[in-house]
Amino acid sequence: MKLALSLISILGVAGLPAAIAAPEGTLSVHILNQQTGKPSAEVIVILEKQTGSGWQKLATSKTDSNGRVKSLYPQDSAMSAGVYKVTFETGDYFKQQGQASFFPEIPVIFSVSQQNEKLHIPLLLSQYGYSTYRGN
């Protein structure tokens, strides 16, 4: 009986989609369109780190069909303390939806206080406003 329950548990986990079972990165983002209540897919997201002379681009990605980028920070390096900026290219997203938008891009500047801190930045979006916060 115990063997059967163990096999069922293993098979249940093995049947999960790879996206759920895959480990998430140090920094993830999520965009939800507040007007439609649906995720915002295909939005370009840029990650930069502040340097003494400006901003250094670290990564660029697009949100998936669920409006997410599960791992925006490059997985082959450690995310050190400092000031970072995530820019959501929302103008192109709204153009693809056939809508105007007041904000062609939304920069979110945030501080990282410890190396490899797990961070999540959600964006609640509409054509003429947005909201964001530190998620988990």
Image: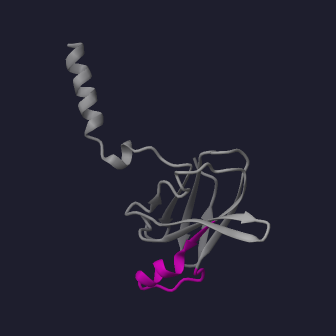
Colour convention of the picture: one colour
Left or right relative to 94: residue 130: right
Above or below, 10 against 18 in this view is above
Q: Nearer the viewer, residue 102 or 106?
A: 106
- Compared across the picture, whether 97 is left or right of 105 comes to left
Residue sticking out furthest to the front: 76
Image quarter hosting the N terminus: top left
| 21 left or right, relative to 71 | left
Q: Is residue 118 magenta?
A: no
Residue 40 placement (x, y as % from top left): 44, 68
Q: How many labels does the image show?
A: 0
Residue 88 image position (x, y, % from top left): 56, 71
Q: Answer whether residue 98 is magenta in the image.
A: yes
- Against 7, is 88 above or below? below
| Residue toward you, 83 or 99 | 83
Which of 61 and 52 lies nearest the eye of the viewer?
52
Residue placed furthest toward the top: 1
x then y, percent, for residue 131: 61, 65
Q: Bounds of the magenta span?
A: 86-104
Q: Give the residue drawn at x 73%, y 64%.
A: 50
Examine the rendered structure and indicate whether residue 89 appears above or below residue 17. below
Percent position of residue 19, x then y: 36, 49
Which residue is located at x 50 percent, y 63 percent? Answer: 31
- Residue at horizontal 40%, vertical 45%? 22
* Residue found at x 45% / y 65%: 63
Observer-nearest of 98 and 112 = 112
Quarter-of-image position of residue 56: bottom right
List the single residue furthest toward the right: 52
